Amino acid sequence: MKRVIAYLLTGCMMVSMLAGCQGKSEEPSTSTEPAQETPADNQEEKEETPAAESTSDSEAINIRIAHMSNETEAIHKGFVKFKEVMEEANVNVTVEIFPAKQLVGADNDAIEACQLGEIDMTSVAEMQFAPYSQAFYVFNANYLFDSVDDAKANLEGELGTELKNATKEADLGVEVATFFGGSLRGIFTTKKELHTPADMNGVKMRTADNPINIAELEAMGASAIIMAGSECYTGFQQGAIEGWISAMTSHVSQGYMDVCSYVCDTWHTIYIPTVLINSDLLASFSEEQRAAYDKAIEAATEEQWRLVAEEMDGLYDELRKMQDEGKAVFSELTDEERAQWKEVMVNATEDMVVEKLGDYKNLLESMRQ
């Protein structure tokens, strides 16, 4: 059937050419987005306003952003803000956003697609970018930040600058555009209330194939089970795993509370969505386009962190409500309890993180001062 359609289209094109008709030239689409309307399409139509005809002399550029978050999450809304500000600048730049795994289904896929120019921008988990940019192993350190506000301040300061420079110097084909805000991470189990590291003894905990993550779990007496994130929901249901470490907002918003409802807010790391941009695209901007891009990135970052703060406030209210309704067991750690987690987890992993950082170990040393 597809071949028949292709032959018919080819025939129509030949007839048009013979008839002397002249049509508009269009750039070939690289999108694999389904033809039917999706919720994301609907949202973009509602948010867009007719753009004024560009008076810019800059070459036309279309920025394709692909990420894995759904349209209700702060990451997507941050990118929407970027689109709004970038297009309002009227510098001959348009922006397309493909959320919810439409074009990329995993962090590694997103990184490599952005390197190759198959997409232009994306957002990936900070720890998943470490194998590409060594300085990012600093995020494997437990209790690196005191709070979400502390993370924001450091990422907007010297730490963020060092990480951006390290990535640029590595010549990966991508650069760090900005750091979005993310959720505090906690520990979730299916049937055991946690207050101290000793409570982890014997719990079958899912982990990625990361020696640092495995070491911290084993130091607390847990059994580390390597499992892909996509298999965890079923793993909880079947009892193959009894817990995992997750960004708290994601665990709740993605429905995992249905199968894993014991919550412990250890706050030992913070999920930092790292926004990447293709290096060739960034270099192709004219002076006015680069100025518009810088403004759009700044606006998107501020909006996204604001939304994350609201999400975290709402999350705690939601978890307390679920506990009152008997749908969750929520362990809000005291300062004394959290200090016990910090001691065990930092002691178990700090030397490994320093070794992974290599020449960038100064990043961790400066954060510990």
Image: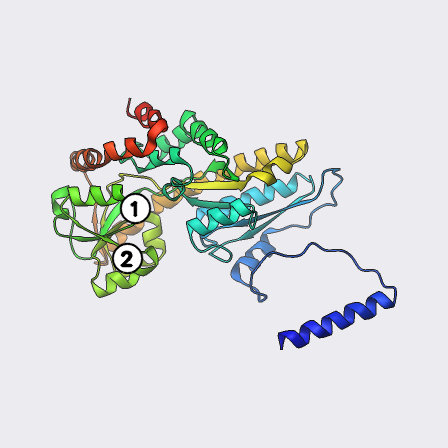
Q: Pointer 1: residues within 10 angstroms few (<14), some, or many (20+)?
A: some
Q: Position of residue 83 (x, y in %)?
A: 58, 45
Q: Nearer the viewer, residue 363 or 171?
A: 171
Give the position of the N terminus as an image quadrant: bottom right
Q: Position of residue 124 (x, y in %)?
A: 43, 45
Q: Which residue is mark 2?
A: 257
The residue lying at 38 percent from left, 44 percent from top is 128
Q: Nearer the viewer, residue 324 or 109?
A: 109
Q: Nearer the viewer, residue 85 or 136?
A: 136
Residue 332 visible from this viewpoint: no
In the image, farthest residue toward the right: 20
In the image, farthest residue toward the top: 369
Residue 161 visible from this viewpoint: yes
Circle on res. 316: 1
3D distance between C-alphas at marks 2 and 1:
14 Å
Q: Position of residue 278 (x, y in %)?
A: 55, 41
Marks 1 and 2: in contact by CB < 8 Å? Answer: no
